[in-house]
Amino acid sequence: MNQLEAREPMLCEYTPKDYFGQVSGVDIFGNDHPLEIDLGCGDGTFLLEMAQHYPERNFLGVERLLGRVKKVCRKAEKLGLTNVKVLRLDSKYVVEWLLSPGCVSKLHLLCPDPWPKDRHHKRRLVQVSFFEALEKVIMPGGEFYFKTDHSEYFEWSQEKAQLFGRFPELEWAEDAFFYPKTDFQVQWEGEGKSIHRMRFQRPV
């Protein structure tokens, strides 16, 4: 890639006008289609498949690493997807401070870093405070989806959900609806690991 190409803005990369304000789906996409958030979207496998399958919905991928953001944007633009944006920012900040109240229809947290060492557990995204933030940004009737291959992190997350206590857990059979696998899930299942899943709903 030459220097000119490197400077070209990526059409699907979203940059807030004010990082200290709040944004909604209308601010991001210019329409009021249902907004779904993919926290830590990685290489965009899940994000892009969902956007292709559900063109009537908008999808915002959140990713901290610039290289991944650029890669996902290149893929989205090659596919001609107009319902995908990628935001380079910390997931915790996005949920706790950036998103407007009640603007999210569905939020996906798939295969996050489990921070397995005891001294690092405070760095885990799933905490009671995280559920409190979700309650603010997810609309009534909206849903939160979580997957991990790490059994201890899964148990930790169940415990935090129970301590929070205001999101009923829903059944989630693997073939209940279209839900593509992330690159991490494909890799881990190929290694014989089990994937644990939870699905919650904000009460109406």
Image (tube, rainbow, N blue to C red):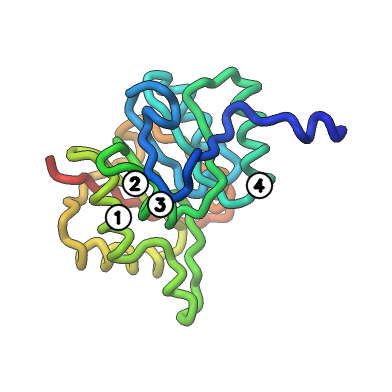
Q: Is 119 situated above or below 183?
A: below
Q: Is residue 37 left or right of residue 183?
A: left
Considering every residue shown, the one lying at the far bottom of the view is 119
Mark 1 or mark 4, which is nearer the start of the sequence? 4
Q: Quadrant of the N terminus?
A: top right
Query: Which of the two discs, 3 and 1, sits closer to the camera?
Result: 1
Please name whichever residue, 81 or 8, is drawn nearer the observer in this view of the structure: 8
Q: Disc 4 designates what residue?
A: 66
Residue at which label 1 appears: 133
Residue 156's disc is none
Side of 91 relative to 128 (left or right) = right
- Mark 2 or mark 4, which is nearer the start of the sequence? 4
Near mark 1 (Cα within 10 A), the count class, few <14, some 14-19 or many ≥20, is some
- Badge 3 or badge 1: first in the primary sequence: 1
Earlier-in-chain disc, 1 versus 2: 1
Label 3, residues with CA under 10 Å away: few <14, some 14-19, many ≥20: some
Residue at left offset 69%, top offset 45%: 67
Residue at mark 2: 145
Q: Which residue is drawn at 34% across and 46% down?
A: 145
Nearer to the camera, 136 or 177: 136
Q: Which amino acid does label 1 sit on?
A: Ala
Q: Is mark 1 on a helix, strand or loop?
A: helix
Mark 4 or mark 3, which has the lower sequence index?
A: 4
CA–CA distance in space, label 2 to label 3: 7 Å
Q: Residue at x 43, y 74 (%)?
A: 121
Check disc 4 and give the amino acid type. Answer: Leu
| Circles 4, 2 touching at the beta carbon (< 8 Å) | no
Q: Is mark 4 on a helix, strand or loop?
A: helix
What numbered label is drawn on residue 147?
3
